[in-house]
Structures are given as C-alpha cells and as structure tokens.
Image (spheres, helix red, strand yellow):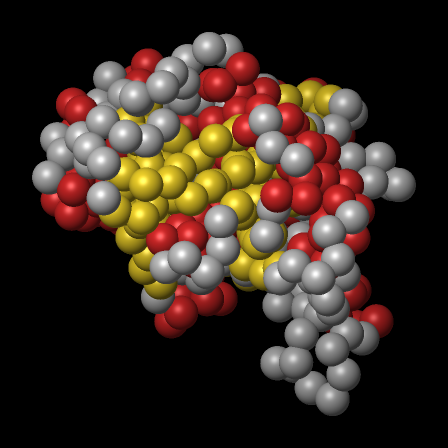
Amino acid sequence: MKKAAKITGFGGYVPSRVIKNTDLEKMLDTTDEWIQQRTGIVERRWVTDDQSTSDLAVEAAKIAIQNAKIDVKDIDLIVVATSSPDTDIPGCAAFVQAKLGLPGIPYFDIRQACSGFIYGVSLANLYITSGVYKCALVIGAEVQSKGLDKTPNGKGVSIIFADGAGAVILQATDVKDETKDPHVLTTHLHADGSSASELWMPVPGSAFGPVRITHEMIDSGKIYPQMNGRLVFTHAVTKMPEVLNEALTATGLKLDDVDMHFFHQANTRINQKICEDMKIPVEKAHTTINKFGNTTAATIPLGMYDAFQEGKIKPGMIISMVAFGAGFTWASALVRY
Ligand code: UT7
C-alpha cells in the first residue's frame, strides 16, 4: 500500500462581466477577426472594480469543497497560484484563508504564472504523500484585467489575458492497486530564469532604482505585462510536448492511455500545434480559451471544472495537465481521477 493524494473535488468561477472582442476593437485598435484568427479567443471575463483575485478564488474553492463533499474545516493546507494577488504583501492566499474562516492553517502563494497551478499540485501532493497534511485546497486564480494596458500600446498582450479561478481538493489516500486507484501519478517542474524578461511585469519592483514605483515608470508603461509573444509561442510548442513526454516516461503510460489533456490556454494555435505534432485527437484536449481567454494560473483548474460540469471527467480516467509560461516555467502532471 502506498500513501498518495487524489483529487476529490473540482471548482471554478468566472466573473459575470463578459468582454467580447468587439468591445476591445476601439480601445486597443484591434479587430475581432485578428483576435479570433491569431488566438482563438471570442470573449473573456473581466471583474468589476469591487472584485479581487481572492474573491474569485473563494468562489471556486467553495464549489470544489462542495463537490468533494468535505467540510471546509477538513482543509489543512491552502495553496494559491496567482500572478495577480490582491496585494503584493501578503499575497493572495492570506485573504482566501481569512474569507474561508480557516485561521491557523498554513498557506502558500505560488508565483510561477501559467505553470503555477501544476507547481501548486506538486507541492500539495508532496505534503500529502509525506503524511504532513491530509486535505489541501489548491487554487489557480487571476484578476489580470486590472493590470492590462487598455490602450493601443497594449494590443499585443491585453487581448489574451483575462480573469477567473479554478480549484481542486486533494486528499490523502491509500493506493492498493496503482493501475486502478485514483491518485496523482506524477508531476514534473522546470524553469529557466534567464528568460525572465521575455514575459514580465517589471514594476512595481526592486530592480529599477531607489523606489519600487515612480510616476515616470507608470507613464512609460512599465506597470503593464510585456511579452515577446513569438518567442513565448515557440518555446511553448517545444517545452509542453517535452514535459508531457517526461510524465509519460516516468509512469510507463502511453499517450493513448491519457483520456483528457488540460493544456494551458494561452493561444489555440499553441495547443493545435501540440496536438498536430504529437498526434493527439483535438477532442481529447479540452478547450476553454474561446470563452474565458487566458486566465494564466487558472486556465487548467478552470478547464477541469468546465469539463467536469459537462460530464466529461469520469472516475478512472487519466488526465494530463501541461503548462508553459512566464519565468520561463513549464510543468506537467498525470492524475488518475
Ligand atoms: O500565458 C502566458 C504565455 N503566453 C503565451 O503563450 C502567448 C504566446 N504568444 C502568442 O499567443 C502570440 O504571440 C500573440 C497572440 C500574443 C501575438 O500573435 P502573433 O501572431 O505572434 O503576432 P505578433 O506579435 O508577431 O504581431 C504580428 C502583427 C504585428 O504587425 P506587423 O509588425 O507585422 O505590421 C503586430 O503589430 O500583428 C500586429 N498585432 C495586432 N494587430 C491587431 C499584434 N497584436 C495585434 C492585435 N490586433 N491585437
């Protein structure tokens, strides 16, 4: 018998405010046609002024708790992956913990952007398999819309990013039959910090002088995410298959054994290229980018909740999660549900 962690609940939440491509045409000097052709996005959700990242995270968490049929008090670890926390100090997880009414239990903010949720699953999985904690809430949540350049200068970036949250409950389990019992089979994490400035938001930060933010920095647009889109794209289509293959090799599974793939939703063309190169039937790769855009750390758990709600995730299925993003970071996980 082996100690392991299994997913027992999925949750997801997006704000109700729908932003269609046509809403961005004048603001960003773009067109619906360009956005759809280059990214696959049709619409996305943006919060209203009074909503924060932890608000979305808590809504997703409540659904995951309900689906796992646990009491909120059963949770003994919180991990929140986000690159858009409510505040820089103390991050996002603090507010999630307080809003869920769980004083005393530890929490982490994970800052690995698009790969953050898989980094979070990996961390929680290790804590559970080592016997330290029994029930982890792992969330990916973002409010990107409040940090985007909403002028034509931002058209290369602001068209893709969006707001949303997804969550899972991971619980301790004893695995008797590795080929049948639900559990996290493997996780693989990678990073290359030498590419940090290829996709970053430099300000506020400690890298540029005596203070973290100045009016000049704001005026020059350093407060907005900046991305070398083509470079990120070419790395994503190489590293995502590589890290998925690494997970398959580690488990001895074949690509055909995987029932559903949850690829990070950055650009439909990235995932189409991966499916084409790896000969994965496109219907096995669940897509939400058309309706939710790129919600960074949230795309994978939000996608899993979306598929779960559609009845596509069934007990016994093998699920992959694969991401690439800022850092650069890339990661994969294989799970039997
Ligand atoms: O989730 C985090 C990880 N991020 C990613 O994985 C994103 C990966 N990259 C991408 O998805 C794509 O690079 C983008 C969607 C961001 C951009 O698409 P692209 O096909 O790489 O466009 P580009 O930046 O190379 O720009 C091509 C042209 C340029 O015009 P010129 O110089 O050829 O005349 C841009 O100015 O398209 C122009 N352009 C736009 N035109 C209309 C860029 N953005 C827009 C826009 N609307 N929104």
Q: Where 111 sits versus 213, above or below?
A: above
Q: Nearer the viewer, residue 199 or 287?
A: 287
Q: Where 248 sits versus 131, above or below?
A: above
Q: Give the left or right position of residue 30, taking residue 102 as reference.
A: left
Is residue 237 something that shows in the picture?
no
Q: Position of residue 7 (x, y in %)?
A: 44, 35
Residue 178 sits in quarter: top left
Q: Give the left or right position of residue 253, taking residue 190 as reference.
A: left
Residue drawn at x 41%, y 13% as measured from the top left: 312
In the image, farthest residue toward the right: 50
The quadrant the C terminus occupies is top left
Q: Give the left or right position of residue 6, taking residue 310 as reference.
A: left
Residue 217 sits in quarter: bottom right
Q: Give the left or right position of residue 259, taking residue 299 as reference.
A: left
Q: Position of residue 330 (x, y in %)?
A: 36, 52
Residue drawn at x 84%, y 35% as measured from the top left: 48
Q: Nearer the viewer, residue 139 or 182?
A: 182
Q: Where 99 sits versus 8, above or below?
A: below
Is residue 247 something that shows in the picture?
yes
In the image, farthest residue toward the bottom: 210
Residue drawn at x 23%, y 44% as measured from the top left: 1
Q: Nearer the viewer, residue 26 or 176?
A: 176
Q: Nearer the viewer, residue 189 or 195?
A: 189
Number of marks present in the image shown:
0
Residue drawn at x 79%, y 64% as measured from the top left: 219
Q: Position of residue 91 (x, y in %)?
A: 70, 61
